[in-house]
Amino acid sequence: MNLPRIVLTIEGHRIDALVARSDEDRAQGLMECTSLAEHEGMLFIHDAPIEACFWMKNTPLDLSIAFIDDEGKILNVEEMTAGSLEGTRAAGLTRFVLEMNSGWFAERDISGGALMEGLPLPAQA
């Protein structure tokens, strides 16, 4: 994948994330991706907060997904099964979505309420 990357941190853990910002890149996501490095993921960025729902069509990897609000706070973390067409929903309005290898967040005891650092947060009013 030829996407830009961003370095994020959460509770001292570094993440090297591919950035999916366009409609086309967000629709493609990690479809057909067969592996991610241990600290590699994909960050989906939306122009405004949305009611996010993700599925795993054509994605051969089990993934963990974190839904993140406008201020960088994780709303919820869920596990997603490779190839599943079942939607996984955010617990609130979401600006960012981060997909990592399955179990990544649980293995580091990261859950709702944790703050992600390094996100391109919207300008504060």
Image: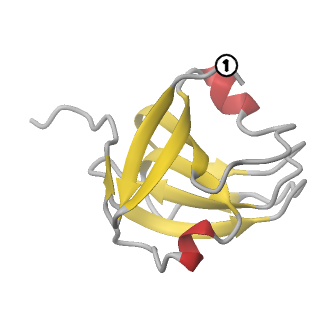
Compared to residue 30, the image places residue 11 above or below, namely below
Residue 13: x, y in percent? 42, 61
Q: Position of residue 102 (x, y in %)?
A: 71, 66
Counting from the top left corner in percent of width and height, residue 41 is at 60, 47
Q: What SS does tag 1 mark?
A: loop
Image point (72%, 48%), residue name: 36
For image coordinates 53% across by 26% down, the residue present is 21
Identity of the residue drawn at 71% across and 30% down: 27
Instruction: Identify the residue shown where x is 87% and y is 37%.
Output: 32
Residue 112 sits above or below residue 115 on the image:
below
User: What is the quadrant of the N terminus in the image?
Assistant: top right
**Side of 23 where 75 appears, left or right:** left
Residue 68 sits in quarter: bottom left
Taking depth in this image into account, of 27 and 35 the one nearest to the observer is: 35
Q: Name the residue carrying label 1.
A: 2
What amino acid is at disc 1? Asn
Q: Dot 1 surroundings within 10 Å: few (below 14), some, or many (20 or more)?
A: few
